[in-house]
Amino acid sequence: KLSKRLQQVASLVPNGATLADIGSDHAYLPAYLIEEGRIRFAIAGEVNQGPYETAKRTVEEAGCSERIRVRKGNGLEVLEAGEVNTVTICGMGGGTIVDILSRGKDKLTGVRQLVLQPMVDGDQLRRWLHANGWRIAKEELVVDEGILYEILKAEPGYERYHDDLWYEVGSVELLRHHPLFPDKLKAAIGKIDRVLKSLRKAQGEEALQKQEALVQKKKRLEEVLRLCK
Ligand code: SAM
């Protein structure tokens, strides 16, 4: 059975899509979408031999070899430009996802949506998307086995956030009614509290400035949290 996290990712893939799942590991996501009849064709890309073989096994056992091509290679190099209209990259750090997208930019022509699930550094990813001709059309949050995950759906377009906070926690406009957004904000506040605690002993102008910036950010997060209620 697909994890709650990947089910939420799957729900953002449009029906009838042609999909490339990069860093597919076991290829559970494309196999699920094919088995459910949700998509027509998928490519599962993997850079590492072990997961590449696991992916091939999943696809063979599911009898999906006609519809899912498992390819070995780094990031988007497994794709031909125009081959798919949807790319998913999940379960990696935001920095790694940015690296894969920027190295493979030429492969993204014709791609109508990216569905991305960064484990950390979502801010880096949001900034990269905005700087490279993508707008964030949807943000999703899901708790799976006690861990809160964020998922972004981007489409070609132009957009900028005027508030840096939105790059860090996601667009408040998109997320303010999401039932899990308060949890996300509380987690961000908790993280700031921990840093502030460790900074309390530090001395000097730089430490003070850092503390002040964090206190301001915490205030902003608390404001947004109040807005959600
Ligand atoms: N996408 C799956 C998920 O969300 O459950 C698997 C996530 S797993 C933690 C990350 C996978 O990405 C690993 O199998 C790893 O080998 C693969 N990977 C990491 N960097 C990659 C790259 N540049 N190109 C292709 N695959 C990569």
Image (tube, rainbow, N blue to C red):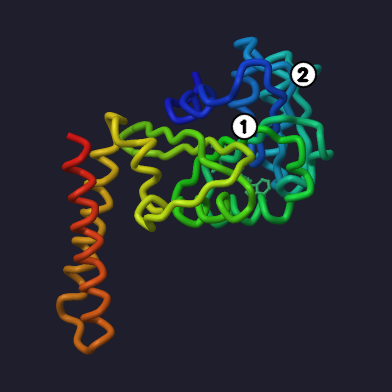
Instruction: Say whether disc 2 or disc 1 marks the residue closer to the N-terminus.
Output: 1
Q: Secondary structure at mark 1?
A: loop
On residue 67, the disc is 2
| Left or right relative to 77: residue 214 | left
Residue name at image x 64 percent, y 10 percent: 37
Nearer to me, 155 or 58: 155
Residue type for callout 2: Arg
Residue name at image x 44 percent, y 51 percent: 161
Query: Height in image: 158 above or below 26?
Result: below
Rendered location of residue 199, percent (x, y): 21, 75
Asked which quadrant contains residue 69, the reply is top right
Mark 1 beta carbon near ligand 1 (under 8 Å): yes
Rendered location of residue 141, percent (x, y): 38, 34
Q: Secondary structure at mark 2?
A: loop
Residue type for callout 1: His
Between marks 2 and 1, how big is the CA–CA gap?
16 Å
Query: Height in image: 98 above or below 61?
Result: below
| Left or right relative to 216: residue 80 | right
Residue under label 1: 26
Nearer to me, 177 or 204: 177
Q: Tell me if mark 2 has few (under 14), some (14-19) or many (20+) residues whose alpha carbon lies within 10 angstroms of its own.
A: some
Query: Height in image: 94 above or below 1?
Result: below
Rendered location of residue 77, percent (x, y): 79, 47
Q: Count of labels shown?
A: 2
Asked which quadrant contains residue 164, the reply is bottom left
Residue name at image x 64 percent, y 25 percent: 30
Q: Tell me if mark 1 has few (under 14), some (14-19) or many (20+) residues whose alpha carbon lies within 10 angstroms of its own.
A: many
Rendered location of residue 90, percent (x, y): 55, 39
Farthest residue in the bottom direction?
204
Nearer to me, 192 or 157: 157
Q: Quadrant of ligand 1?
A: top right
